[in-house]
């Protein structure tokens, strides 16, 4: 996003709407009594919130032409934009919310996901790469229909394409499948890599609801000191596979 300095009147209303604090104000070169807004493109995640807020009366805020690799910011940060590889807006994945149709996660194994950043915090993809590389060493199976997977230079190592590593996004999530015996190594790997991550990240555990399915995994999670919160996402199983 950018601000047209010729149109900006220096009302300073837009900065409050930026979730990453990328908008600041500089002295107006033509009027020393006024300040005009500027957007730090290094920090801007291209979420478009400042524009959609509709607080800029002279319409000075606009979206510039965005090419690769900056377009990664747009796809992961603006919920109105679909990821080209998955056709899903936002973070670009339906996770387990459509599992009764996709069959992405199956009994006898567990789905897990790691999400870096949040609105107000954000994160750079190089942090996600550190996590992915730590997980890849354990041999987890990364979800192929996740937009992050398309950014891997090598899915076997979890290494991202060099040009996207420094891109900043509101949040991004990687999904993967683990065997029961991999749960403990995965959790330990996340503990070990955590001090190297320069943003917040959260961990998701995906299982079927029966105690025989979720019980063993939750026991390991608690034993290793990970707090388990009651809030989560529940798939009611109302969908039906039409094309078998």
Image: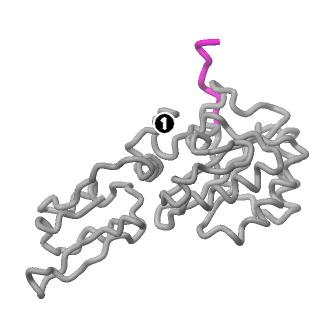
- The quadrant of the rendering that contains the N terminus is bottom left
Pointer 1 residue = 88
Residue 18: quadrant of the picture: bottom left
In the rendered view, tell whether residue 232 sits above or below residue 59.
above
Does 57 lie within the magenta span?
A: no
Q: Main secondary structure of the magenta part?
A: loop
Percent position of residue 203, x then y: 69, 55
Percent position of residue 97, x then y: 60, 36
Residue at x-position 65% and y-position 56%: 129
- The quadrant of the rendering that contains the C terminus is top right
In the rendered view, tell whether residue 243 sits above or below residue 169.
above
Please tell me whether mark 1 sits on a helix, a strand or a loop: loop
Residue at x-position 34% and y-position 49%: 66
In the rendered view, tell whether residue 19 sits above or below residue 12.
above
Residue 139: quadrant of the picture: top right
Does 239 lie within the magenta span?
A: yes
Residue, far left:
30
């Amino acid at each position: 996003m950018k601000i047209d300095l010729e149109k900006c009147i220096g009302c300073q209303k837009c900065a409050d709407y930026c979730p990453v604090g990328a908008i600041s104000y500089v002295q107006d070169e033509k009027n020393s009594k006024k300040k005009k807004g500027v957007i730090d493109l290094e920090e801007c995640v291209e979420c478009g919130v400042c524009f959609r807020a509709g607080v800029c009366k002279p319409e000075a805020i606009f979206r510039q032409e965005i090419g690769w690799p900056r377009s990664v910011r747009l796809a992961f940060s603006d919920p109105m934009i679909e990821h080209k590889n998955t056709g899903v807006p936002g973070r670009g994945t339906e996770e387990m919310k459509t599992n009764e149709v996709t069959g992405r996660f199956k009994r006898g194994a567990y789905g897990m996901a790691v999400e870096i950043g949040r609105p107000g915090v954000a994160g750079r993809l190089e942090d996600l790469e550190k996590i992915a590389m730590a997980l890849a060493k354990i041999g987890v199976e990364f979800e192929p229909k996740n937009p992050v997977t398309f950014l891997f230079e090598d899915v076997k190592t979890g290494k991202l394409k060099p040009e996207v590593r420094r891109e900043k996004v509101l949040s991004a999530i990687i999904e993967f499948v683990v065997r029961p015996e991999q749960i403990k190594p995965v959790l330990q790997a996340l503990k070990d890599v955590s001090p190297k991550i320069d943003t917040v990240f959260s961990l998701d555990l995906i299982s079927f609801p029966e105690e025989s399915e979720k019980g063993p995994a939750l026991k390991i999670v608690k034993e290793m000191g990970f707090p388990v919160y009651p809030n989560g996402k529940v798939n009611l199983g109302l969908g039906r596979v039409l094309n078998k």
